Image: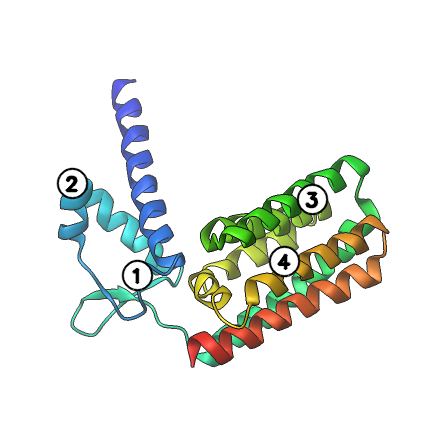
Amino acid sequence: MNKLVKIQGYELLSQKIYRTIKRQITRGFMEPGEKIYANQIAKELNVSRTPVREALQKLSSEGLLKVTPNKSMVVAEISVDDAKEVLQVRGVLEGLAAGICAKKITEKEIQKFEKIIQKMNITVEKGDLFNYCELDDDFHELILKICGNKRIIKIRESLDNFIYRFRVKSLRVNRRIEHSKMEHKNILKALQQHDSEKAEKLSKEHMNNTIDNIIKNVIN
């Protein structure tokens, strides 16, 4: 029994390391092409190398890290075509989920969206890009939750890793954060009106605007 407890704790440590590194990558603190050193990470986190290596292997399997010909591990780069394809697929999924959500949403759930929008307003005023991204996630995760389509949710989650790292950078240019906030408000209006067609259309437009901004100002 004691051994099982130790194994669970060990697995939890590996997962924590995985989440820590993933957060650094997806928030843009680790640039594409940057080398990753397991020994250095283990030393900084004061852990052994084994759980670090397992965390890195998981990140590699998700496409966030890649192994170079000389066996070094680096933050994976994403081409313009890859980013565009991922965002296009996500746009279709987001639109479909929003359309379903508009048909099912309750007044209590609308109030949850309204609270998210209120917090978005505050973060935009403060220029707090990182917390805005968290609220952006909350908004779209709530749509997916209300939608309830497990297949949409699973496919959409598999796409997130490829694009998260560009979001903070993209919000810094061309007043994108303000436009993004307004797009979320318009989507919420469609949800409040239970207008499935409009909610789907606005969600797709929101993602297309994100695509254009990232490709024009971040990846190129």
Quote the CA–CA distance across marks 3 and 2: 42 Å
Q: Residues within 10 Å of mark 3 (few under 14, many from 20)?
A: many
In this rendering, the answer to whether 128 lies above or below 220 is above
Residue 48: give its label: 2
Q: Could you tell me residue 6's position as x and y percent? A: 26, 26
The residue identified by callout 1 is: 30
Q: Amino acid at mark 3?
A: Phe
Instruction: Work out whether mark 1 precedes mark 2 in sequence or the reverse, and give the earlier one.
Output: 1
Between 92 and 108, the one nearer to me in the picture: 108
Quote the CA–CA distance across marks 3 and 1: 32 Å
Q: Residues within 10 Å of mark 2 (few under 14, many from 20)?
A: few
Mark 4, mark 2: which one is toward the viewer?
A: 4
Disc 1 is placed on an element classified as loop
Quadrant location of the C terminus in the rendered image: bottom left
Instruction: Work out whether mark 4 precedes mark 2 in sequence or the reverse, and give the earlier one.
Output: 2
Mark 3, mark 4: which one is toward the viewer?
A: 4
Quote the CA–CA distance across marks 4 and 1: 26 Å
Q: Residue at coordinates 51% horizontally, 53% vertically from top-left? A: 133
Instruction: Work out whether mark 4 precedes mark 1 in sequence or the reverse, and give the earlier one.
Output: 1
In this rendering, the answer to whether 6 lies above or below 170 is above
The residue identified by callout 3 is: 113
Q: Is residue 188 left or right of residue 14?
A: right
The residue identified by callout 4 is: 181
Q: Amino acid at mark 1?
A: Met
Instruction: Work out whether mark 3 precedes mark 1 in sequence or the reverse, and give the earlier one.
Output: 1
Q: Could you tell me residue 88's position as x and y percent? A: 61, 72
Q: Residue at coordinates 23% horizontally, 71% vertically from top-left? A: 68
Q: Is residue 91 left or right of residue 165?
A: right
